[in-house]
Amino acid sequence: MSAGLKVGAVVITMGNRPDELRALLDSVAKQDGERVQVVVVGNGSPVPEVPDGVRTLELPENLGIPGGRNVGIEAFGPSGRDVDILLFLDDDGLLPEHDTAELCRQAFDADPRLGIVSFRIADPDTGVTQRRHVPRLRASDPMRSSRVTTFLGGANAVRTQVLAEVGGLPDEFFYAHEETDLAWRALDAGWMIDYRSDMVLYHPTTAPSRHAVYHRMVARNRVWLARRNLPAPLVPVYLGVWMLLTLVRRPSRPALHAWFAGFREGWTTPCGPRRPMRWRTVWKLTRLGRPPVI
């Protein structure tokens, strides 16, 4: 087994899935090797009963997904420095294998420039991985591992050195695209991201549009993502492509109305600090199969 790399896990919860949360925590406790330290963050809600040894934090208000996860990071010291690797796991997920944490240790130990690992998400009943859960354009074969340019928010592992170097998730995003924002900053700093099909999180098949704020925040945060991270000439290209794709998908009239409202909001509200990526990072993204115009 890989020695020396300490692993922690951050789970945020709204307190409404106590049975699923307990099953997830039990699956983390069964991981091979040194015990994975776990922090559960109640995001504006009480934390259900958890096993002994699991730390809990209860926030007085819902800070959103990135805000809640950032609180969990800081529970391991500034930028999570008390551990070497942090797992971020959805509270209704489950690690079906006992070697996932150990595979993470081995991956990060073997590649000093590996910053983030994205797990494969599979339905617990069918074993199917949704196409949207494969973080690359060529997503037809979810069993193929590869370098990628983004990662899945509720099923991943991050080297805490990355967080110390480029910062955490963007609190202001609240929901949607916060992972890509962190991924682009990490890639610009010289880190790499892997999608690993052998690291699996079971999660029920769902549609992201189940969230009432989905269409507005997807559009708003897409604009913020571009404004914060892309070289100026690419901002209109990237957003123009995404507007065209949205129209081609023919969403319902209410969904389209919410999307355009979010798009306007993205231009008229503060997006946080602007740190455009270098052109060599644009080329890196292109070589990895996803140029930052789509």
Image: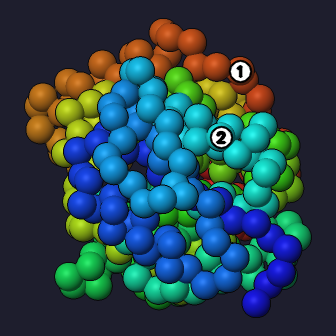
Task: Tell how many labels.
Answer: 2
Specify whether 65 is left or right of 247.
Answer: right
Residue type at numbered disc 1: Pro
Q: Position of residue 3 (x, y in %)?
A: 83, 81
Q: Nearer the viewer, residue 199 or 60?
A: 60
Dot 2 falls on a residue whose secondary structure is: loop
Q: Which residue is mark 2?
A: 75
Is residue 59 visible in the rendered image? The answer is yes
Res. 145 image quadrant? bottom right
Q: Position of residue 244 (x, y in %)?
A: 36, 41
| 46 vs 87: above or below | above
| 22 vs 279: above or below | below
Residue that appears at 72% across and 23% down: 274
- Checking the image for residue 273, the label placed there is 1
Pick out the residue farthest to the left: 253
Residue that appears at 20% across and 24% down: 257
Badge 1 local density, few (<14 within 10 Å), some, or many (20+)? few
Q: Position of residue 165 (x, y in %)?
A: 85, 43
Q: How far is disc 1 from disc 2 in space, using C-alphas? A: 24 Å
Q: Nearer the viewer, residue 1 or 153?
A: 1
Dot 1 falls on a residue whose secondary structure is: loop
Residue type at numbered disc 2: Ala
Of labels 1 and 2, earlier in sequence is 2
Badge 2 local density, few (<14 within 10 Å), some, or many (20+)? many
